[in-house]
Image: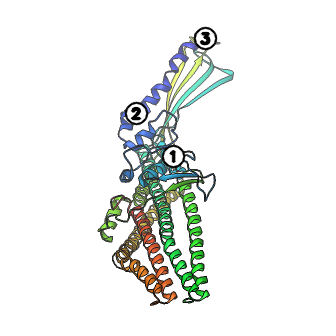
């Protein structure tokens, strides 16, 4: 009889778990969650090496082709300035962004953290495990039906109505906040890639502009030496011209080493070896930003993932207040008990039939001070998250207005440099050289014309890079692209 009853009891845990899951099947409950949660909470396979991007706001940066795998052996050439390093052709910015989103360790860590938070949603909605208790009697208890030899109890706790739903909502909003913060990390990495990329591009253009003026400076040195031989210029002019050549060479060395440092910084963001040399291109004809700061602020209020995370946390904490108030109500525990009765009892009418019982119990929430403190704690957390949302909104507006002003500044200065300063500085140098050749201009005035042209050319490329870097920061602050990609 013991074996027969044990086979029946083996089905009870399955029946209790099916009853505890409620009227909605598990597959349907998962289907009600957003897709971003479904993929992670319902997955049965192992975690992939690179989770997919978590937010559609970055779709503007995604190229149509899959990103290539970079290595120190791809497109290798010998760099005389850095022996043994890998030199790469100019790489499109969009490709580097896609590579960073797929391989950057910070992005991957944020995505795994979001997946971990998403996995807590079904845990919060689940019932606690049923308890199976077995009790063997050291000394049998005699009953009219026979001696009681063994007892087993199977119990299941059922939280008060609504507690499981509220717990799952708290976990759900916490998970959605984690996904939003993962997107914020992605936006931050995109900004860092762009800033490092345009540093490399600026330094490449500065090196090019400096080298383009070197032949003109050599011509000046030749003119000064010729004048010195004919006693039309003193030896100090020759020395000053040669010093300018040396100064230009020192500037080239500084620019080249700064470029190597910027390339190493870019490679680090891309999770590549530090000696990977990535060449960058810079487009000076990018469309102007026409949206006002007010418009960008309105866009950011709906696109900025940090704000979305803060709003999710506010909703989470408000739900936690409702959950804390449900603790004033008791939880129920249902138990099914079986008593194994032997047939060889002292009573002549012993039948050996087993005994069964059904029990229901509740906890008694008597300690009101603890429950009241839990409600106050949840209310204070809600107030805190609300104030943090207000602070984040103020910070976002301030940052967008400041960055918008910087973008306008760079665009206007670039327009002046391109249409006025450079158009006059370039012919001024040629005229100064010719005037000095025929003795109509002093040496110092000619050198100042050369120095001004070099300074204006480098400043122009620096302004282009600063505009692109400021736009990168502005897009991160807004949460989406605001101009066409170069």
Which disc is residue 26 wearing? Answer: 2
Residue at image mark 1: 112
Q: Residue at x 57, y 79 (%)?
A: 244
Is there a contact, CB below 8 Å, between mark 3 and mark 1? no
The earlier-in-sequence mark between 3 and 1 is 1
Q: Is residue 457 above or below residue 175?
A: below
2 vs 3, front mark = 2
Q: Considering only order in the chain, which callout, 3 or 2, is on the residue closer to the N terminus?
A: 2
Residue 181 horizontal/vertical position (percent): 46, 55
Note whether residue 256 is visible: yes
| Element marked by disc 2 | helix
| Residue closer to the observer: 18 or 466 | 466
The N terminus, quarter of image: top right
- Among the 4 quarters of the image, the one containing residue 389: bottom left
Disc 2/disc 3 C-alpha distance (Å) = 44 Å
If the image is split into quadrants, where does the C terminus sit?
bottom left
Q: CA distance from mark 1 to mark 2?
A: 24 Å
Disc 1 or 2, which lies upstream in sequence? 2
Of the two numbered discs 1 and 2 in the rendering, the one whose residue sits closer to the viewer: 1
The disc placed on residue 217 is none
Q: CA distance from mark 3 to mark 1?
A: 60 Å
Q: Is residue 327 visible?
A: no
Disc 3 secondary structure class: loop
- The image position of residue 450, as x and y in percent, is 48, 80
Disc 1 is placed on an element classified as helix
Q: Which residue is mark 3?
A: 343
Residue 153: % across, % down = 56, 27
Q: Residue 435 location in percent, x, y? A: 43, 86
Give me the residue at 63% from left, 54% from top.
83
């Amino acid at each position: 009889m013991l074996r027969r009853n044990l086979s029946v009891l083996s089905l009870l845990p399955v029946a209790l778990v099916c009853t505890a899951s409620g009227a909605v099947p598990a597959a349907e409950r998962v289907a009600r969650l957003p897709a971003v949660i479904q993929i992670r909470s319902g997955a049965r396979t192992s975690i992939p090496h690179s989770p997919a991007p978590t937010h559609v706001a970055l779709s503007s940066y995604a190229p149509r082709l899959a990103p290539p795998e970079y290595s120190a052996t791809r497109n290798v050439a010998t760099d005389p300035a850095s022996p043994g390093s890998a030199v790469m052709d100019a790489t499109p910015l969009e490709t580097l962004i896609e590579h960073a989103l797929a391989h950057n360790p910070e992005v991957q860590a944020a995505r795994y953290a979001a997946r971990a938070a998403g996995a807590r949603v079904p845990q919060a909605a689940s019932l606690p495990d049923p308890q199976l208790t077995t009790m063997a009697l050291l000394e049998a208890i005699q009953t009219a039906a026979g001696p009681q030899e063994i007892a087993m109890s199977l119990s299941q706790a059922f939280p008060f109505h609504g507690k499981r739903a509220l717990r799952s909502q708290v976990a759900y909003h916490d998970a959605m906040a984690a996904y939003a913060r993962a997107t914020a990390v992605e936006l931050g990495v995109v900004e860092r890639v762009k800033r490092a990329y345009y540093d490399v591009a600026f330094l490449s253009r500065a090196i090019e502009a400096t080298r383009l003026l070197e032949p003109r400076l050599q011509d000046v040195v030749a003119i000064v030496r010729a004048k010195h031989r004919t006693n039309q210029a003193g030896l100090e002019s020759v020395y000053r011209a040669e010093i300018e050549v040396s100064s230009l060479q020192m500037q080239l060395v500084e620019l080249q080493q700064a470029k190597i440092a910027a390339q190493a910084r870019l490679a680090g963001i891309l999770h590549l070896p530090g000696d990977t040399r990535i060449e960058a291109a810079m487009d000076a004809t990018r469309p102007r930003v026409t949206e006002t700061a007010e418009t960008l602020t309105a866009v950011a209020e709906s696109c900025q993932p940090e704000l979305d995370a803060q709003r999710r946390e506010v909703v989470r904490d408000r739900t936690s207040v409702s959950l804390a108030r449900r603790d004033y109500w008791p939880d129920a525990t249902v138990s099914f008990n079986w008593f194994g009765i032997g047939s060889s009892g002292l009573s002549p009418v012993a039948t050996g039939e087993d005994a069964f019982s059904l029990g229901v119990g509740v906890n008694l929430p008597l300690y009101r001070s603890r429950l009241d403190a839990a409600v106050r704690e949840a209310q204070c957390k809600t107030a805190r998250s609300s104030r943090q949302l207000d602070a984040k909104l103020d910070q976002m507006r301030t940052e967008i207005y400041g960055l918008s002003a910087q973008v306008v500044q760079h665009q206007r200065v670039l327009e002046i440099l391109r249409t006025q300063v450079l158009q006059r500085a370039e012919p001024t140098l040629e005229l100064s050289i010719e005037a000095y050749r025929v003795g109509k201009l002093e040496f110092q005035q000619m050198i100042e014309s050369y120095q001004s042209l070099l300074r204006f050319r480098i400043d122009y490329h620096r302004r282009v890079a600063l505009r692109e870097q400021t736009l990168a920061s502005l897009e991160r602050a807004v949460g989406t692209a605001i101009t066409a990609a170069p």
